[in-house]
Image: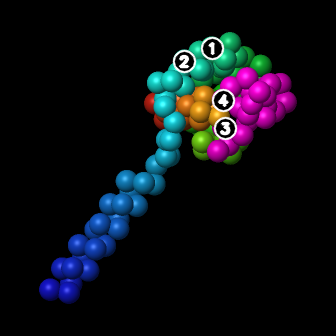
Amino acid sequence: MFKKVLLAFLACITLAFVSFSGTALAGDAANGAGVFGANCAACHIGGNNAVNPAKTLKKADLEKYDMYSLDAIKYQVTNGKNAMPAFGGRLTATQIEDVATYVLSQADKGW
């Protein structure tokens, strides 16, 4: 009996780990698509990068440059970096969360 309970417990823990080990998306990707279209698509259409083609929004590049997380994307959108302007003064925190969620969801889908 103890063995069955232990196996059931381990199965639940494993299922919980697998279920939550992916990227947690907190924002509204549908709203983020609109924010992206209005503010980001000029340089990043289709997940590309018109200014620096080596640093796309594709999953492999986001991972390569330690940008594959909501926090990393939100920080860069808010503060800018190099040629990318800061959007913290133009977009609300919710819009930034939504666009970061959209970028990650699109990266996961392969743009």
> Residue 102 placed where, x, y %?
53, 29
Q: Nearer the viewer, mark 4 or mark 3?
A: 4
Q: Which residue position holds label 2?
A: 34
Of labels 4 and 2, the one closer to you:
4
How far is mark 1 from mark 4, CA to CA? Answer: 14 Å
Image point (59%, 15%), residue name? 37
Query: Which mark is nearer the camera, 1 or 4?
Result: 4
Q: Which of disc 1 and disc 3 is earlier in sequence?
A: 1
Q: CA distance from mark 4 to mark 2?
A: 14 Å
Measured along the vertical axis of the image, is residue 85 above or below residue 13? above
Q: Position of residue 90 (x, y in %)?
A: 73, 23
Q: Is residue 76 magenta?
A: yes
Label 1 vs 4, first from the N-terminus? 1
Residue under label 4, please give it. Answer: 92
- Label 1 with label 2: CB-CB less than 8 Å: yes
Front residue of 89/22: it is 89
Residue 79 in sight: yes
Q: Secondary structure at mark 1?
A: helix
Residue 54 visible to the viewer: no
Residue 28: % across, % down: 49, 31
The amino acid at mark 2 is: Gly
Looking at this view, is 81 or 97 the one in front?
97
Q: Residue at x 50, y 46 (%)?
A: 23
> Which residue, given by chain and number where applicable, does mark 3 sit on?
74
- Badge 2 crowding class, 10 Å Cα cut-off, few under 14, some 14 to 19, many 20 or more, is some
Which residue, given by chain and number where applicable, does mark 1 sit on? 38
Task: Return the disc, 4 or 2, that comes first in the chain's sequence.
Answer: 2
Residue at position x 21%, y 84% in the image: 3
Q: Identity of the amino acid at label 4?
A: Thr
Given the image, on which type of amino acid does mark 3 rest? Lys
- Residue 14 lies in what quarter of the image? bottom left
The magenta span reads 71-92
